[in-house]
Image (spheres, helix red, strand yellow):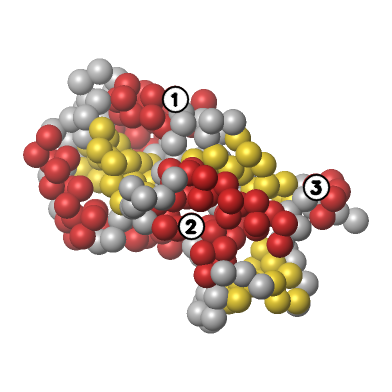
Amino acid sequence: MRIALVEDDHSQNELVKIWLEKAGHHCKCFFDGKSFMRDIIHETYDLVILDWQLPDVGGDEILKWMRAELDSYTPVLFVTGRQSEEDIVHGLNCGADDYMTKPVRKGEMLARINALVRRNTSNIDKDNKFEVAEFDFDLMKKVLKKNGEEIELTHKEFDLSLFLFRNIGRILSRGHILESIWGKSSELKTRTVDTHVSRIRSKLDLSKESGWNLSSIYQHGYRLERNDNNVE
């Protein structure tokens, strides 16, 4: 997953980043609230780990701002040194999906992250199948069928198609897509994403006429949406 870590304690920030990257996640660190808020306007993440106590903007205020202002929903794991029930309830009411109290423990944090992942992938069955409307993904064979007919895709095209369909309705930045599908690589450019999206749009016929809209979001990335009004 692509994770934003918002924590002003530099030693804690670095330690958690090591835990996350060893667990296979991409992690971008922020040491204050405003820098994170500027970034997330143009970027997307699978999860935000958000500290309550920050030097400029409180984590609870950032959380309320995210839920009110951002078009795309991002799960938030709220981290707080406050342990009273009232404080925890406040964090959840601000829009947190889960919370942890400090001191943060590695095993607990990774378990909570995995639980949030399971919630977001709960529609994948035991046979590693993923189905959305007329599209059937076979995750083991990397085969995609539309209305029972197999669509010829490269492995990267399959992975990108699956990523888009798992995130229907979300705005996904080009950087998020690059990291999720190709991993970190300075050799790859955002043009790689644009080229693959264009091929997928054509091969899967993701057009308004067919009931789908894979749109480009200016200076940001892409969003796949279901356009039920055009489906007979």
Q: Can you say whether 9 is above or below 184 in the image?
A: above
The label number, if any, that marks residue 23 in the structure image: none
For label 3, the SS is: helix
Closer to the camera: disc 3 or disc 1? 3
Residue 232, image x and y in percent?
Answer: 90, 56
Q: CA distance from mark 2 to mark 3?
A: 26 Å
Q: Quadrant of residue 202?
A: bottom right
Q: Which residue is mark 2?
A: 120
* Near-viewer residue (154 or 35): 154
Q: CA distance from mark 3 to mark 1?
A: 32 Å
How many numbered discs, if any?
3
For label 1, the SS is: helix
Q: Can you say whether 22 is above or below 225 in the image?
A: below
For disc 2, the neighbor class at 10 Å (few under 14, some 14 to 19, many from 20) is some
Q: Quadrant of residue 154?
A: bottom right
Residue 127, image x and y in percent?
Answer: 53, 81
Tell me which residue sits at (38%, 26%) in the image: 37
The label number, if any, that marks residue 208 in the structure image: 3
The label number, if any, that marks residue 65 in the structure image: 1
Marks 2 and 1, the one that precedes in the sequence: 1
Q: CA distance from mark 2 to mark 1?
A: 22 Å
Tell me which residue sits at (54%, 59%) in the image: 160
* Near-viewer residue (96 or 164): 164
